Amino acid sequence: MARFSSISLTEYAEFLHQLWPGVGLPSRLGIALSGGVDSMALAYLTSRLFSSHNSPPSAIHAFIVDHKVRPESTTEACSVAQLAKETYGFTAHVLPLTWALSHTELLNGLETRARIARYQTLGRACVENRVEKLLLAHHADDQAETVLMRLLAGSKIQGLAGMRAAAGIPECGDIFGAERVVLGRPLLAVEKGRLRATCLENEVHWFEDRTNQDATLTRRNAVRKLLSASPPRLPRALQRPSLVALARRAEARNKSVKDQARMVLEEDCDISFDPTTGSLQLQLPPKIRGIQPHVLQNLLVRVVETITPLPRAETQSLQTPLKSILSNQGKPFTAAGLKWTYLSDKTWFLQRQNYTSKSRGLCRIVFISINPGWTSWRLWDGRWWVRLFIPIPSHPAICVRAMEEKDIGPLREKAAQVNMDRQLEKLLKEGLRGEMRFIIPAVYCGGEVLGLPSAGLWLGSGPSEEGVKCEVMFRGRGGLV
């Protein structure tokens, strides 16, 4: 059996420097603690590093997620929090997950459900505690498991890069402020054996989760058992060192493609964004056929992700746009949640695709006033952040939804009542022509329209609407509209 060396403080400091070059030690830091040997090694090293810089340990927020899958999980989570607080001086938070599912339903797809719930809970906790950098204890063995699982799932080169050392927090697109949270995995190149050695050498206590050894519980557990078999049961190309090396090569290739796409986008493309409708006009380079297809595809992903109502732009969903762009096809089509219209001279117009009866019902949010004042920010249709100022607690419920054709008449009547009919007509003729008026947020109270906030039109003036205000901000572009 190989003998592993522990991780020195100097080595760990270098890992953090590589993670966030030039940033230095954050004044406020989050750390996700499971209580296992990996996260407790991370806690120990981070505590030592903060102490060596005379930084208060209370500036480290330890987030302990209680998955509530095992009967003993709550007791264990509280023990981890107590250890983090008493031994390291961290500010500890136990974050319980709530499941609206039976135990049998939960176990079906446990890994995916738990991952989504865990990241959403961590994202909210980071926002609430003003933490913008969150450390995770993923290591090289975890990376190998991830890559093998993706190979088995048929992932292409983008997915085979595995986990990134630094990345935005996933699954938190509908949490306001979570876009500022950056995940850091300083131990991603370190073998698990070295983390165990670090804990043993420094008498760091950790907790064992027996479910991690149950190969029948999750796919990852099965892959972990396969990779840890002795003697090895897999060919050398599928063993840990080869899988980690594959992840490094894939990440280097992906970075090269992203850098090339960013350069083309910044130097050879012209983008005009319309904050009123959340649409954009994209003019591509004249010599577009000279751009490698995978670079152009990445460029399209970057553009689409700025305005799509979908949580993310999947590369596969951009096959149709890629073919149409290369062939200068003039017929409009839909892809990645958007309608694509060819104008001329390598120029495309992208807007949110028209709603179906199902999608129209889903993009409706309701604000119910409990206390007077500003509500929290909520994401409408995956595109606009919206919040309301409601001055009185007894105010009727207010909803934000997309307009329909039948709403135009009442909208005109309301505008005429408040002497804003000329402003409305100008808006409908210029900025909100045709179907564009039906893809933006409209605010309603008791069935009556209060305004189109992204278009700067606010009509609320009746007794029930007096004093109500609305702010909207397009996702990912900042600034109030």
Image: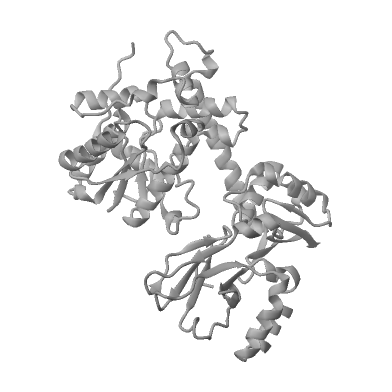
As rendered, which of 398 and 334 lies closer to the eye?
398
Image height of 165 relative to 439, above or below: above
Q: Is residue 132 visible?
A: no
| Snapshot quadrant of residue 307 | bottom right
- Residue 87 seen in render: yes
**Could you tell whether 413 is left or right of 74 in the image?**
right
Spot the residue most to the left.
86
Residue 285 image point, x, y percent: 73, 56
Q: Position of residue 247 (x, y in %)?
A: 51, 30
Give the farthest residue toward the bottom: 419
Residue closest to the eye, 75 or 319: 75
Count the numbered circles shown.
0
Residue at 48 percent across and 46 percent down: it is: 170
User: If the image is split into quadrants, where does the C terminus sit?
Assistant: bottom right
| Left or right: 338 as drawn, with respect to 43 | right
Q: Position of residue 202 (x, y in %)?
A: 19, 27
- Left or right, 175 with reference to 362: left
Residue at the spot 50% in from the left edge and 67% down from the top edge: 386
**In the depicted structure, whether residue 291 falls above or below residue 468:** above
Is 463 left or right of 452, judged from the image as shown?
A: left
Q: Which quadrant, please, contains the N terminus?
A: top left
Colour treatment of the image: one colour
Q: Residue at the spot x=28%, y=33% of the render? A: 35
